[in-house]
Image (tube, helix red, strand yellow):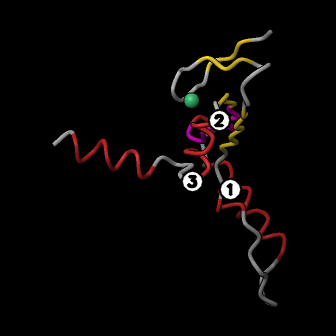
Amino acid sequence: MIQYTCDLCGCMINSDSNKRFVVKLEIYPIDTSLEIVPMDSDTDPIELMEKMIESANEIEIEELPRNETRRFDLCCGCHKKFSTDPLGRKTSRKVYFSSN
Ligand SMILES: [Zn+2]
């Protein structure tokens, strides 16, 4: 029997008797500067390419956060909570008000 721990409430999940849910999150930045711009008839494509390369060189690689993939194990109860409020907005609001 394999035992897992719920990453939200910390309870033990037995693989035999309890349902276990896996949440996979993928976080990645969207670089809007590299979006394709519709070309005007009087835009020189070579000039446009040079401008794009210039602006790409200005971006420092360290500034951009890397793609991040995360994996969480959830128990049945926490899965229900997560699926109704995936970003924890209701929960964080409660915590915010109770701390005042
Ligand atoms: Zn849980």
Give the residue at x 65% y 35%: 76
Residue 19 figure quarter:
top right
Ranked by sequence position, the earlier of labels 1 and 2 is 1
Q: In terms of image quarters, where does ligand 1 lie?
A: top right
Q: Nearer the viewer, mark 3 or mark 1?
A: 3
Mark 1 near mark 2, Cβ–Cβ under 8 Å? no
85 drawn magenta: no
Mark 2 near ligand 1 (CB under 8 Å)? yes
**What whole-number distance in Å separates the C-alpha atoms at marks 1 and 2?**
51 Å
Name the one closer to the observer, 35 or 70: 70
Ranked by sequence position, the earlier of labels 3 and 2 is 2
Residue pushed farthest top? 1
**What whole-number distance in Å separates the C-alpha atoms at marks 3 and 2?**
13 Å
Report how many numbered discs are placed on residues in the image. Answer: 3
Residue 12 figure quarter:
top right
Q: Nearer the viewer, mark 3 or mark 2?
A: 2
Name the one closer to the observer, 66 or 11: 11
Point out residue 82 in the picture as x, y percentages from the top left corner: 58, 44
| The residue stretch that appears in magenta | 63-70
**Residue under numbered circle 1:** 54
Mark 3 near ligand 1 (CB under 8 Å)? no
Amino acid type at image mark 1: Glu
**Residue under numbered circle 2:** 76
**What whole-number distance in Å separates the C-alpha atoms at marks 3 and 1?**
45 Å
Amino acid type at image mark 2: Cys
Q: Secondary structure at mark 3?
A: helix
Give the residue at x 66% y 36%: 66
**Residue under numbered circle 3:** 84
Q: Secondary structure at mark 2?
A: helix
The numbered mark at residue 87 is: none
